[in-house]
Image (spheres, helix red, strand yellow):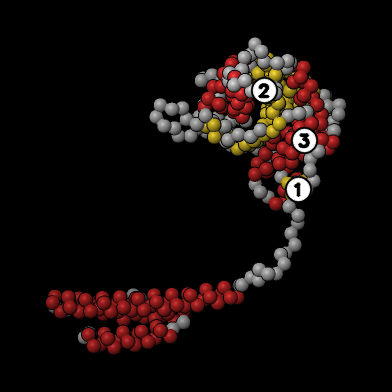
């Protein structure tokens, strides 16, 4: 086919393409570039030509094919733009219209638990403290008298972050105890500088991280811990504090509370704390069964020495509670994973009015 013939064919094809709709564009593509299309047949005819003629004709036909392809692409882009414009016009939303009525939002039960804890311990003179989620190995383990061979340091329990050569890796904190270490370090520094300091009395709610996941464990969960340090703190203060808290939080004035000897590296003596409940019905404060609820103890002298506090002059107590655990018990929630699924139906059922503040009398 001569150059004039290709030029005429191109003009005819471009004329049809320029006025074609979406359906016609596809039909033209098939008739021109398809398996049996005009351009494809021209390329097939090259096989019967002499080498020199084939080279010249092949260049013309390939140039023609490129022009046809560009014309089809340009027309399809115009049609797509027009279709999008029409769709946007048809689906336009008038943002000046009032919103559709939606149910009032609610406070997540974990947030509510933190508010209630803050109210109860606030009445006891505690101050709320927070700290970073990423901690040094020393703050998270060593300062707390946790030895290097302790299982809690194993990779299967702790999320370690990449560290520089010859440095201990940072960790996603496995408990909120590093905030206790930070607080005691600040307290000891002020005392060493001759500044007046009041006894430490803090609670520390926050996120913690461990490599565990099932119906009662989550890789990310929440704890709150308490710490009291002073010159005359005894085990009796710890027991009285926790008994008052548990009875106020669960709303059972006569809630049975039991302390059992246990072991933690950072406390000595250490105690598990149980509350009375009915194993069959799940009712708290009823029945003759016991349920472990938290760990506690007197701060180990090694921990005090590690942060620069003289254990011969000062002592104190600490305790730790899983926020999800006590929230599940109080509100009858049977699966930890439900806290993090963002199911709006679940949140409406277990949520609390955002403008209803937690006060101490609600738990008493």
Residue at x-position 70% and y-position 19%: 230
Question: Which residue is depicted at the point 57% across and 36% down?
Answer: 133
Tell me: 208 left or right of 1.
Answer: right
**Residue 214, percent from left and from top:** 62, 37
Q: Residues within 10 Å of mark 3 (few under 14, many from 20)?
A: many
Which part of the image, by quadrant, shows the N terminus? bottom left
Q: Is residue 189 left or right of residue 14?
A: right
Task: Determine the image quadrant of residue 309.
Answer: top right
Residue depicted at x 48% and y 75%: 81
Disc 1 or disc 2, which is closer to the eye?
Answer: 2
Residue 95 in which image quadrant: bottom right
Q: Is residue 153 above or below residue 86?
A: above
Q: Give the number of the disc on residue 196.
A: 2
- Label drawn at residue 108: none
Q: Secondary structure at mark 2?
A: loop
Percent across and percent down for residue 196 are 67, 22
Q: Which label was assigned to residue 119?
A: 3
Q: Are marks 2 and 3 in contact (CB under 8 Å)?
A: no
Which badge, 3 or 1, is on the more N-terminal residue? 3
Q: Residue furthest front?
A: 194
Q: For mark 2, does the 10 Å Cα neighbourhood hold few (<14), some (14 to 19), or many (20 or more) residues?
A: few
For the residue pair 70 and 206, the one nearer the viewer reads as 206
Residue 213 lies in quadrant: top right
Foreground residue among 332 and 127:
127
Q: Which quadrant, please, contains the C terminus?
A: top right
Residue 263 in sight? no
The residue wearing badge 1 is 354
Q: Marks 1 and 2, Cα distance to the nearest angstrom?
A: 39 Å
Which one is earlier in the sequence, the residue at label 1 or at label 2?
2
Residue 110 appears in the figure: yes
Taking the spot 13% from the left edge, 77% from the top edge, the residue there is 52
| SS at mark 3 in the image | helix
């Amino acid at each position: 086919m001569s150059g004039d013939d290709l030029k005429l064919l191109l003009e005819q094809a471009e004329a049809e393409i320029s006025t074609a709709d979406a359906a016609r564009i596809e039909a033209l593509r098939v008739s021109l570039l398809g398996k049996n299309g005009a351009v494809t047949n021209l390329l097939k005819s090259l096989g019967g030509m002499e080498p020199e003629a084939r080279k010249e004709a092949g260049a013309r036909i390939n140039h023609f094919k490129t022009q046809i392809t560009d014309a089809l692409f340009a027309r399809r882009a115009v049609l797509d733009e027009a279709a999008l414009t029409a769709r946007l016009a048809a689906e336009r939303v008038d943002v000046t219209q009032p919103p559709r009525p939606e149910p009032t939002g609610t406070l997540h039960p974990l947030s509510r638990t933190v508010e209630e804890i803050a109210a109860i311990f606030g009445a006891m003179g505690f101050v709320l403290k927070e700290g970073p989620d990423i901690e040094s190995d020393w703050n998270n383990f060593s300062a707390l008298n946790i030895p290097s061979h302790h299982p809690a340091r194993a990779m299967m329990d702790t999320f370690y972050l990449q560290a520089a050569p010859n440095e201990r890796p940072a960790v996603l904190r496995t408990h909120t105890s590093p905030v206790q270490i930070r607080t005691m370090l600040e307290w000891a520094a002020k005392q060493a500088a001759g500044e007046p300091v009041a006894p430490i009395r803090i609670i520390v709610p926050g996120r913690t991280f461990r490599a565990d996941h099932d119906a009662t464990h989550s890789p990310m969960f929440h704890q709150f811990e308490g710490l009291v340090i002073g010159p005359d703190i005894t085990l009796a203060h710890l027991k009285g504090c926790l008994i008052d808290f548990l009875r106020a939080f669960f709303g059972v004035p006569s809630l049975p509370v039991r302390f059992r000897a246990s072991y933690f590296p950072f406390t000595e003596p250490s105690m598990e704390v149980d509350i009375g409940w009915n194993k069959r019905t799940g009712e708290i404060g009823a029945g003759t069964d016991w349920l472990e609820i938290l760990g506690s103890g007197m701060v180990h002298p090694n921990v005090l020495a590690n942060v620069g506090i003289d254990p011969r002059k000062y002592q104190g107590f600490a305790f730790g509670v899983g926020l999800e655990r006590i929230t599940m018990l109080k509100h009858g929630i049977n699966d930890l994973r439900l806290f993090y699924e963002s199911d709006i139906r679940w949140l409406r059922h277990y949520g609390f009015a955002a403008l209803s503040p937690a006060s101490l009398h609600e738990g008493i």
